[in-house]
Image (tube, grey):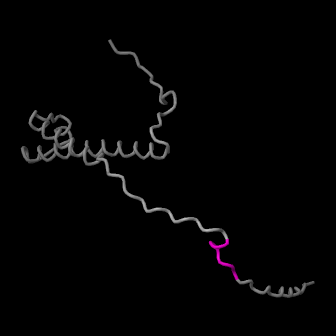
C-alpha cells in the first residue's frame, strides 16, 4: 500500500515570537543560530571524509552518506559540538560605555557664519535666432 500524499502548509500560522525589543536583533540571532547549525554539520561531514580517507584511501558520496559514527567517534563529536556552542554563544561581560557629552545650547553649538556678499546676477546672453 502506498501512503497518501500529505500537503503541508508552506507558511506557518501566527506571528513570529519576538524576544528582543528590536526585531532586527531577533533576525540577527536567527541568522547566527542557523549559520552555527550549518557549520556544525560541516564539521561532522569533514570529519567523516577524513576518517574514510584514513581507513580506505578513497571516498565516494555513497560512502559518506552510509557512514555511521561508532560510539567513541560520536562521543568525540559531541564534545567538539559542546565546545563549539559554548564559544559561539558565550556571554560577554557588558562593556562600559563612555558618557555622552552634554548637549550644548544651539547658539554655542554652531558658530556664527560670516555672511558672504551676494553676487550680482549674471546678465543673460541673448540667443541669436536663426531664420
Please count the marks in the image. Answer: 0
**Residue at the farthest left position:** 55
Q: Position of residue 104 (x, y in %)?
A: 60, 68
Q: Where does the image place residue 66, in percent across and percent down from the top left?
A: 17, 34
Membership of 22 in magenta stretch: no
Q: Is 128 left or right of 98, judged from the image as shown?
A: right
Quarter location, residue 85 = top left
Residue lying farthest to the top in this orientation: 1
Residue located 30% across and 41% down the image = 37
Left or right? Give the position of 112 relative to 28: right
Q: Which residues are magenta?
A: 107-113
The image quarter containing residue 34 is top left
User: Residue 51: image x %, image y %?
Assistant: 11, 44
- The answer to which of 40 and 118 lies nearer the viewer is 118
List x then y, in percent, for residue 103.
Answer: 58, 65
The residue drawn where x is 68% and y is 79% is: 112
Is residue 109 magenta-colored? yes
The quarter in which the C terminus is drawn is bottom right
Q: Is residue 3 above or below residue 79?
A: above
Left or right of 62 in this view: 30: right
Farthest residue in the right direction?
131
User: In the image, what residue occupies the spot 18% across and 40% down?
Assistant: 64
Give me the residue at 67% from left, 72% from top.
107
Lateral position of residue 131 relative to residue 114, left or right: right
Amino acid at each position: 500500500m502506498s501512503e497518501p500524499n500529505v500537503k503541508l502548509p508552506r507558511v506557518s500560522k501566527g506571528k513570529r515570537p519576538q524576544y528582543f525589543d528590536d526585531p532586527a536583533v531577533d533576525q540577527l540571532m536567527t541568522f547566527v543560530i542557523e549559520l552555527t547549525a550549518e557549520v556544525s554539520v560541516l564539521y561532522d561531514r569533514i570529519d567523516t571524509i577524513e576518517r574514510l580517507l584514513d581507513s580506505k584511501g578513497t571516498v565516494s558520496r555513497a560512502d559518506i552518506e552510509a557512514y555511521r559514527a561508532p560510539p567513541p567517534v560520536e562521543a568525540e563529536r559531541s564534545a567538539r559540538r559542546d565546545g563549539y556552542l559554548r564559544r559561539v554563544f558565550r556571554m560577554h561581560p557588558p562593556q562600559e560605555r563612555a558618557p555622552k557629552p552634554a548637549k550644548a545650547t544651539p547658539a554655542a553649538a554652531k558658530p556664527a557664519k560670516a555672511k558672504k556678499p551676494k553676487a550680482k546676477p549674471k546678465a543673460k546672453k541673448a540667443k541669436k535666432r536663426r531664420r
